Structure formats: structure tokens, C-alpha cells
Amino acid sequence: MRNYLLISYVFPPTGGVGAQRALKFAKYSPEFGWRPVVLTPDQASSSLRDPGLLADLPPDLIVERLPSLEPASSGKVSTSLRTADLPPLARLKALAAGLLFPDRHVLWLPTALPGALAAARRHQARAVMVTAPPFSTFLLGLMVARLAGLPLVLDFRDDWSGFYTKGFAARGGGASWQRLVLACERLCVRAAARVIGNTPEMTERLARLHGGGSGKYVWIPNGFDPADYAGLEREPAPDPEGRLRLTYAGTVFAARPLGDLWAGFARLTPAQRARFAVTVMGRVLPGEVADPGLEGLAVEALAFAAHQEALSRMAAADVLVLTVADLPGLASMVPAKLYEYLALGRPILAIAPWGEAARLIAATASGTVVPPGQPEALARVLAGWLERPPRPGGPPPPVFQRRRLSALLARTLDQAIAERS
């Protein structure tokens, strides 16, 4: 069994969809000859907590929780990404954090580096693997790999220079900031032995942008763990009031808005809307609408839920809603929750431009895709379902099972150290 450093800023008990990828790699990669040594902050600057995820970790997993200079989270789920909505002191702190490059989590690096190097020596690590965002962790991985003389593997969960250039702001920071991000990304990618993208388009873009040969770039998508769905009902129980139940899971923000969904419902009559029930489960950031107040339409807004509770609530839906804003670069990404939707087998309503998410839905015949900005088309789909409800999707493609994806990661690590030797 060979050890590798798995650097992930988000890791249980931190919750949210971003924690799932590292969690499942840590769970399954030992089956393929690679034992992770997880490096994560002792107190991640995140308000999302899901202690139940800890039960999914192998009992002998080594987790090094390294100190950070970041302010500790209050433990409350924040509903704001805009500094204008914060109290004066918090606003000042947010503005100061906005000056940090490449992101505010760079404050973890100075205190994490000594512990990371010590962990590499103590556990005789053979490789360094970093999953991001936050993308400042790529710099930590780069420094550890160079100082310890180990091959570096970078895992892009999101598109850095092509979209999330500053935090989770689309193309944020201005032109100068974006040039710095591109230069930083190039430095990290060119130093890496292998680079993983979680969609084909993202992986191909990184290869075109930074070069180094096609063998350097690997596609490992997000996925689902069948163990998470044991005990969930394969078919939802009928709604007592005979309504068609739609559920949206996840944060509602500029990249994942609900405005088009509400615009489609606005084209229906009150009597038609009364035959639907919509659940919005997750954070709703300022500027976004959780309930449009349309006559007849029942809307329930729920706060962030632990992963297993969220899956149970999604399993109770008749239709699962996915939204992707029509923003440059966003179509190259696939929301991680789409794979969970596929695993649940519920029909999917995707309001999304043609891109990776829409292609995946079409390839799996798992739902209906309506482009953003077409409320009349969406209204026709909704009205049609009142006469003929959407059919459930088929079994999820096995290729997206987390165990299989961990096998791909193990193969990638094998190639990285073989090349180094």
C-alpha cells in the first residue's frame, strides 16, 4: 500500500457538495493500492457542517487537521456573498479578504506548509494530490511537491481561469486579476505530473491552454456512491393533494438561479399552478428569489440539510430541478448534484444552455432541458406534465460510481509516480 497526500480544504465535518469528492476518494482509493493522508484545515472558514459524513470515513483514515490563520466560522449558515449586505465590521473584513490572492483561503498556506511537509516525511508519501476550489490550495500542493520531491496531481472540481476567477464570482476581479489567475494556474498546471478535470470540455480546455501533451490530462467526473442510496424509496409516495412536486437542491445564486423557473410558472394560470408544489432546499443568496409569491403556487423554502437528509427529501420529489445560468464558461461545468439526481432516478427538469450538463441529461435520457430565457417553452413543459407526468429516469450509469472513479484516480497516481521514476 502506497501513501499519498490528499489536500482538500473542504472535508468532513465540513458539509456541502464540495466535500463529497475528497470524501469518496478517501473512502475508496485504498481498495486500489493508494492510502490517503488527508490534509485539511483544523477550522475551515465555512459555515456548512455535516458531522454525519464522518461515519463514511474508513476507521483507519489518517486526517491531519492543520492550523490556519483564517478567522473561525461562526457556525451559522451565511446567506450573503455581497459585502453591501454585511454589518460594518464584517464588511470591512470581507473587503480586506477580497484583496487576498488568489482567494481569502490563502491564509491557510503559511501555517499548513510545515505540517504538510512533516506529514509527507512521516507517512512516506509517494505523491501529492490537491482538489480545488479553493484554488489557493493548488499553491500549497505545488510547494509541498517541490520541497518534498514528489509528483503533483491537480484536481479541478471547477473551472478556475475560465469562470471562477475570484471566489464564486463569474469572471470576477477585473482584467488584471484574471491575468494573474491565468498566470498562477499556468504555473501550477505546468508543474503538475497529471491534471484532472471533472468534465471533458474543462479537461480539453486546460490541455489547449497550458500544453504538456494529452496524456497529462485526465477526465474524472463527479459521481454518486450507491451506498448513500440504500434504503431510499425507488418511487416517491403519492402527494396527498395530488400535486406534482418539484425540488431544487443546493445554493441559489448567480450561477444557479431560479428566475427562469418562476417565469415559467408565471405563464400558467392560478388553477394550473395549484397543481404543483415546489421545494427549494439550501441557501438562497441576496438578489435571488426563493418564493415568487405566485397565486396558487405552493413553495416551501428549507435551509441547508445534512447530506442524507437532503437525499431523502430529493427522493420524495416527482421532479428534480437543475439550473445553469447562461454565463460565459459555465456550460463547460456540470453541477455535482446532477449525478445525485441521476442516482435517484427521478425525472430532471434542467433549465440550462447547451453544454456539458445538458449533454449528460440527453445522453442518459434522464429529463427535459429548456434553455434559459424561454419561459413560454418552460410553461408548455409544465402544463404538459399536468396531462402526462414525466417518466422516471433509468438506472444511473455505472461509470459514475464513486468506487470506479477512485480506480481512475489510483491509475492516475500510478502514472504520475511511474513518470517521475
Image (spheres, grey):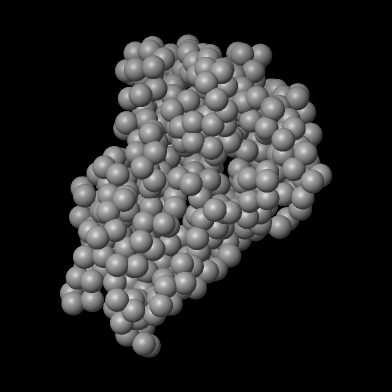
Residue at image position (64%, 18%) is: 143
Q: Does 74 sit left or right of 325 as displayed?
A: right
Where is residue 181 drawn, in percent x and y?
A: 54, 21
Front residue of 124/107: it is: 107
Residue that sits furthest to the right in the current view: 89
Q: Position of residue 271 (x, y in %)?
A: 31, 82
Is residue 35 visible to the viewer in this orientation of the structure? Answer: no
Give the side of residue 365 with respect to residue 323, left or right: left
Name the foreground residue: 379 vs 47: 379
273 versus 328 height, above or below: below
| Count of numbered tags | 0
Answer left or right for 241 relative to 158. Answer: left
Can you give x and y, in whole percent of width and height, for residue 399 in the image?
Answer: 30, 45
Task: Relative to 237, say whether 228 is above or below.
Answer: above
Q: Which of 84 and 281 lies nearest the eye of the viewer? A: 84
Position above or below: 182 against 227: above
Q: Nearer the viewer, residue 421 or 300?
A: 300
> Which residue is located at x 38 percent, y 12 percent?
212
Query: Quarter-wise, where is residue 391 in the image?
Result: bottom left
Splitting the image into 4 quarters, where does residue 71 fall?
Answer: top right
From what the image shows, is residue 222 above or below residue 216?
Answer: below
Determine the image quadrant of residue 255. top left
Residue at the bottom extreme of this rendering: 240
Residue drawn at (32%, 85%) of the image? 242
Residue 416, x across and y down, in percent: 45, 20
- Name the residue: 74% across, 43% down: 91
Residue 304 visible, this orientation: yes
- Horizontal side of 226 relative to 71 (left or right) equals left
